[in-house]
């Protein structure tokens, strides 16, 4: 340490710019024009604290006022960029996981997007344009859903978890609900069937074993206070082998014999039979309704391919009771949800879902189509990359999974793009793709970066190719 200089001077702390000086830099002004001065000032203070700590600890030596200001601006720009990247934006899902919960589940159909835009201003969400009187919220979407599933009535809420809570609370509060031990599952990390049931104020009565539950087990558990028999589709969980649970028809018969109701949480919301796409295990809603379930719940953003929402369909009297429960007010969706749902339900009603609803379109993409798109994509990328760059872009085979708690056992093999580089690790390539704009989400399988075009709309292929080229160049 030089004699005669204060620790302040020797460490360069005195050259640290002021908050005001940082706010005058271009990076900070750009940020402040979007998010306001006060918020920008918080970032400026954070950046200055970081610099101060580095100077104090000796990690950074004094490099003069101007250099420090320029470093502060760079840090500011980096922090602002990183914050924006945590917000909502467009991305390319090249994972091949069609219903990807972390990536917003279902991409919306063209007509849903248009409907959302058209209803973004004022819209008749609770207003009857025929009579000029107050109307019923969600009436049309609910009518279409009832028609589509063969149910007498339907109710839309914010998601399937809300649907399950609302059904259990309104139908079994203060009484007992019987469920098989094999169905006490956790769905998607934070939705545990037993926890939800306890919260609903129902006494949970578990019957059978993890792998086998017989009709007699349910029957023996019925008491004076039983109100509901519950059947939950185990979604992202399968017990394979020596298993059995009674079907909806048998459970419905038992429930009705005993004066109880049967509730099925079907989860994924398969409207038609999807067994030809390897999803034969998914309960078809119409079949559950026909088999006698009094109330069935399912998600709107899994196999229905629409926005986050939950459907409750079933007997008119039962749905009426659920609709008038005070908790419904807390779970009802907003106008944009109904706007998006109506055209998707129409697509299904006219049998056009495989063409019009992206989730169903991706699911039904043929192997030939995907092979051709993959080969064309690879040629285009190779041509732009040129030779002698250390990169390899090849066709391969991989598993595509539907995701979103649907059919975990289904991994149809499909053509994919395999990316490798002599001098770059798979993680480096993956992060290069993820940090491009739009971000590209890929998968790493056996030390190779995989792109699955099944989940990439054709209009995004050019952007995907650019991202691949910069990640490999
Ligand atoms: C996915 C799922 C849920 C939760 O649905 P959200 O719409 O995500 O709330 C509940 N039950 C089952 C059986 C599911 O598969």
Image (tube, rainbow, N blue to C red):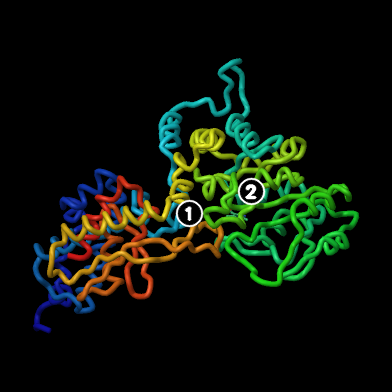
User: From the viewer's perspective, is 118 left or right of 9?
Assistant: right
Residue 402 point in image, percent of width and height: 49, 57
Residue 240 point in image, percent of width and height: 64, 70
Determine the image quadrant of residue 427: bottom left
* The label number, if any, that marks residue 125 in the structure image: none
**Residue at x 89% of width, y 57% of height:** 223
In the figure, 278 relative to 158: above or below? below
**Residue at x 21% of width, y 58% of height:** 381
Residue annotated with mark 2:
284
Residue annotated with mark 1:
99
- At mark 1, the secondary structure is loop
**Residue at x 56% of width, y 56% of height:** 279
Residue 152 point in image, percent of width and height: 71, 35
The disc, 1 or 2, on the residue closer to the chain's N-terminal end is 1
User: From the viewer's perspective, is 275 left or right of 48?
Assistant: right
User: From the viewer's perspective, is 68 left or right of 425?
Assistant: left
């Amino acid at each position: 340490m030089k004699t005669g200089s204060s620790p302040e001077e020797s460490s360069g702390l005195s050259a640290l710019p002021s908050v005001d000086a940082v706010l005058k830099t271009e990076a900070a002004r750009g940020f402040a024009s979007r998010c306001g001065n006060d918020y920008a000032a918080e970032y400026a203070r954070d950046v200055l604290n970081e610099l101060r700590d580095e100077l104090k600890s000796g990690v950074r030596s004094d490099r003069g006022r101007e250099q420090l200001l320029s470093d502060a601006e760079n840090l500011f720009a980096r922090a602002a960029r990183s914050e924006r990247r945590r917000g909502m934006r467009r991305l390319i899902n090249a994972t091949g996981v069609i219903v990807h919960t972390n990536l917003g589940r279902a991409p919306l159909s063209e007509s849903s997007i248009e409907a959302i835009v058209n209803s973004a201003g004022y819209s008749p969400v609770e207003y009857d344009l025929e009579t000029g009187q107050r109307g019923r919220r969600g009436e049309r979407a609910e009518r279409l859903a009832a028609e589509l599933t063969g149910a007498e009535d339907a109710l839309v809420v914010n998601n399937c978890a809300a649907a399950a809570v609302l059904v259990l609370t309104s139908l079994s509060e203060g009484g007992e609900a019987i469920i098989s031990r094999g169905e006490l599952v956790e769905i998607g990390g934070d939705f545990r069937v037993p926890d939800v049931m306890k919260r609903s104020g129902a006494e949970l009565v578990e019957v059978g074993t993890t792998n086998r539950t017989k009709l007699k087990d349910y029957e023996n558990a019925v008491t004076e206070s039983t109100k509901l028999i519950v059947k939950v589709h185990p979604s992202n969980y399968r017990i394979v082998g020596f298993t059995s649970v009674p079907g909806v028809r048998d459970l419905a018969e038992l429930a009705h014999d005993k004066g109880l109701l049967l509730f099925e949480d079907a989860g994924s919301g398969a409207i038609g039979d999807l067994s030809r796409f390897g999803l034969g295990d998914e309960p078809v809603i119409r079949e559950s309704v026909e088999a006698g379930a009094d109330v069935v719940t399912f998600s709107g953003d899994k196999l229905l391919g629409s926005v986050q929402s939950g459907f409750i369909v079933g007997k008119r009297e039962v749905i009426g009771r659920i609709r008038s429960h005070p908790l419904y007010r807390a779970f009802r969706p907003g106008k944009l949800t109904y706007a998006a749902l109506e055209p998707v339900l129409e697509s299904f009603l006219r049998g056009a879902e495989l063409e019009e609803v992206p989730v169903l379109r991706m699911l039904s993409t043929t192997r030939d189509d995907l092979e051709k798109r993959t080969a064309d994509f690879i040629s285009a990328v190779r041509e732009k990359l040129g030779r002698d760059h250390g990169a390899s872009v090849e066709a391969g085979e991989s598993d595509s999974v539907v995701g979103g708690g649907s059919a975990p056992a289904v991994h149809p093999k499909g053509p994919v793009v395999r990316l490798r580089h002599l001098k770059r690790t798979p993680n480096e390539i993956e992060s290069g793709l993820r940090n491009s704009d739009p971000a590209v989400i890929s998968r790493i399988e056996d030390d190779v970066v995989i792109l699955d075009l099944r989940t990439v709309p054709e209009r995004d292929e050019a952007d995907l190719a650019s991202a691949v080229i910069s990640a490999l160049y």
